[in-house]
Image (cartoon, grey):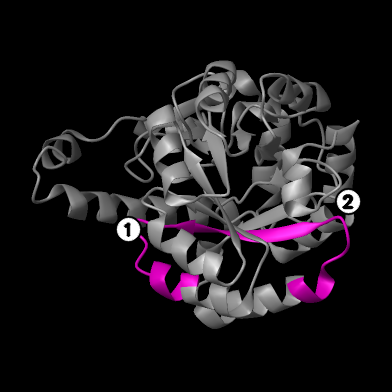
Amino acid sequence: MGTKLSNLLNIKYPIIQAPMFLVSNTAMVKEAMKSGIAGCIPALNYRGLDELRNAIKELKAAKVEGGSFGFNLIVNKSNIKYKGQLEVLCEEGCDFIITSLGSPEETINQAHKVGIKVFCDVVDLKFAQKVEGLGADAIIAVNNEAGGHRGDKSPEELIKNIVSNCKIPVISAGGVGCKADIDRMIGYGAAGVSVGSPFIASVEANVTEEYKQACVDYGAKDIVVTERISGTPCTVINTPYVKKVGTKQTWLESILNKNKKLKKWVKMIRFSVGMKATENAATKVTYKTVWVAGPSIEHTKAILPTKDIIKNLIG
């Protein structure tokens, strides 16, 4: 299964354990590295910079040959912790940073000074070419089968289009729940894959057993797209609560989002409120079950240790 991604990160298998808000943690990434893949954690999973710094030190101490670790940064204005997070990552060091939801220019410039690779989430060719021009080391092509914030193009269309028009490696994100899916993405031209949703139902994940079991009990047909978490379309499990509150913006949000002066603030408020609701659902027993996941939970049949989930992926 060795590909350009394997060489880029010095890992055995071309798989990144995708960064998932509230779900990813150091225990999962340690197991990922032991199994020969890369693991990534959202910097936002840590409330303070000291916690983030300690997590980096813990992973550096646990790193093994054939494994790799990184962190995800939200690089737009909704993340007021961005500057401090980037500074800590560059001070302490990691193998790679994945940027999302904004311009990666500053991250690329600062990370490259200290030898950290930068991969950038994109949903279309225009942004892929833009981040390549800024010096990104690889492109993460987020397709319409991804969990969380997803794109609108199929894996085949997106990968082939970007591979044909960009020179840096393309990593496919979305729609991978088994080895056949990995083979399919690599067959389209991807240098590797980013896999998230199958790891929600891992023993090591820091979420409730109810959330994990939901990924076992529900399937691809139960995934819907909602605008009510971050203001950006996001995939969630269609629980009774999601059905009750709906998946579209309220009429007031819709009107305010059309106002150029207020749009930024409305998005920031929606992001804050939505993330809090997601946190409560993931970490507490509550009827307000807003569980983020992608259609690849179709292949999740049991709650398993991370190492066993990886074994199933690599065949």
Q: Quadrant of residue 190?
A: top right
SS class of the residue under badge 2?
Answer: loop
- The extreme bottom residue here reads 50
- Bounds of the magenta span? 60-86
x then y, percent, for residue 154: 53, 18
Residue at 47% of width from left, 20% of height from top? 153
- The quadrant in which the N terminus is found is top right
Q: Nearer the viewer, residue 103 or 286?
A: 103
Decide if residue 124 is in sight here. Answer: no
Is 18 above or below relative to 86? above
For disc 2, the neighbor class at 10 Å (few under 14, some 14 to 19, many from 20) is many
Is 307 above or below relative to 22? above
Decide if residue 314 is in sight here. Answer: yes
Which amino acid, mark 1?
A: Ser
Residue identified by numbered label 2: 35
Is 191 above or below relative to 22? above
SS class of the residue under badge 1?
Answer: loop
Q: Is residue 4 left or right of residue 171?
A: right
